[in-house]
Image (cartoon, helix red, strand yellow):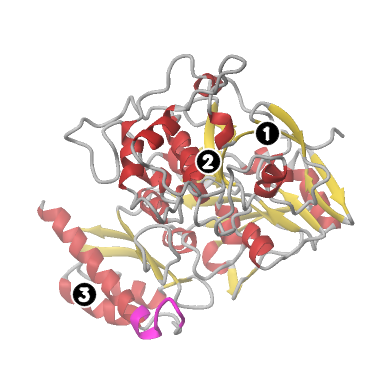
Amino acid sequence: MKRPTITVNGTETPIAPAAPHTTALDLLRERGLTGTKEGCAEGECGACSVLVARPGVDKPTDWVAVNACLVPAAALDGQEVITSEGLATAGAPGTPAALHPVQEEMASRGGSQCGYCTPGFVCSMAAEYYRPGRCEHAPGEAEADAEHGPNGFDLHALSGNLCRCTGYRPIRDAAYAVGAPADEDPLARRREQAPPAPVATEYAQDDRSFVRKNTLAETLRLLRERPDATVVAGSTDWGVEVNIRSRRADCVIAVDRLPELRELHVTDDRIELGAALTLTEIERRLDCEVPLLAELFPQFASRLIRNGATLGGNLGTGSPIGDSPPVLLALEATLLLADADGEREVPLADYFTGYRQSVRRPGELIRAVRIPRPLSPVTAFHKIAKRRFDDISSVAVAFALDVEDGVVRKARIGLGGVAATPIRALATEAALEGLPWTADTVDAAARVLRGEGTPMDDHRASALYRSAMLGQSLKKLYAQTTEAAQS
């Protein structure tokens, strides 16, 4: 098997002799590419942002920004990476490189002061700069809103990057000033060719290994042999464990590029989402096909995290404060669990059994998430957190209601952050179904909703606050639906 390498700024770079747990950030810095910085080591500051060539949604290749501090270097075996140093265009011998357009705008508009965060901002900005269709669908100058520029730049692309110096306005100005990539731009042209195909990887050192197989069947056989292995996709959770808690795994098995886990199918009776599709890929490929998911995505961490995070990973960790479980519970999703013997389908409502525990057996993987159709027409996702974006929720509530002729025919409500597991608000659902969708019904059901779960006091919120927010969320939904009906 070929030794693991990464093509960094056009140069093939060996991963050895780095340890299997070494992050892409540490590998790049060891190779002298020190523009990539470590700020938080948790994927919250974006100082480590780099570009990776990934399968595209509208073109063969998309340039995707990811947190290099979270991704194991071995996970990038065979892939193409561009750092801030690689964005500039080399000039003639003896002449300096020409700045990339996003670098030029950051410099000329005062978007860089101390400079520590600047390379990460530049890489995240470059990913949005190269997003297909950005300029074609740009709003006019008068139509630009608070989160989108007149050039079509989506400011959420920078939601995972932090800066302590500029106050962000000069950075926003730089983002809104970039135009379309030039025809001769090599990274723009690169989007027209397919990204590197996934490669099988077996990288070991000091009795620890990182493994990626070519197929799901091979992976499941390996998991049967190594049920103790740590399974990773985007590493947005495991990377934090490695960096902050110094966790090490004897065997890491990567599933992020398995084709069987990266399928997306939409039929008349269901939508099936591969467990290894990133949230960004799902968001862009569904294109608001599932309104409740479309409402979730902008509130799920940051674009940098969504570019790596997967539904399989978010559900696999079993966290009671994950943002996707409440939404998927409201959508009555089921999970396809696969092992070497076959596959079974489990309702998500029956999946969680305790704090970070589930019915998933040793050797099983989440292959896909199924959402039945037709979808309920009245939906909403309310995330209560200290910040509007890029924060962990104190409480998360997802609603999916069928209201016909003014009567609630069906109600499904998913809750997060109020129990040891994500839960359905069964008592509240029963308090709504069969009754008129009126203020009196909602007030009575809101009192029931406040009593759902077993909320606790912690540093994010008190139990009393969490209970109050549950009741208020239902009242907010009612207000939203009545306002929409009157408009």
Task: From this view, report whether residue 422 is shown above or below residue 466.
Answer: above
426 left or right of 313 in image: left
Residue shown at the point (55%, 62%) measured from the top left: 347
Q: Which residue is mark 2?
A: 65
Dot 2: element? strand
Dot 1: element? loop
Q: Is residue 346 visible?
A: no
Nearer the observer: mark 3 or 1; the answer is: 1
The answer to whether mark 3 and mark 1 are in CB contact below 8 A is: no
Q: Which residue is mark 1?
A: 79
Residue furthest front in the image:
94
Range shown magenta: 458-466
Q: Which residue is mark 3?
A: 441
Frontmost residue, 399 versus 146: 146
- Res 378 quadrant in image: bottom left
Nearer the observer: mark 3 or 2; the answer is: 2
Task: From this view, report whether residue 413 is shown above or below residue 176.
Answer: below
Residue shown at the point (32%, 43%) measured from the top left: 170
Q: CA distance from mark 3 to mark 2?
A: 46 Å
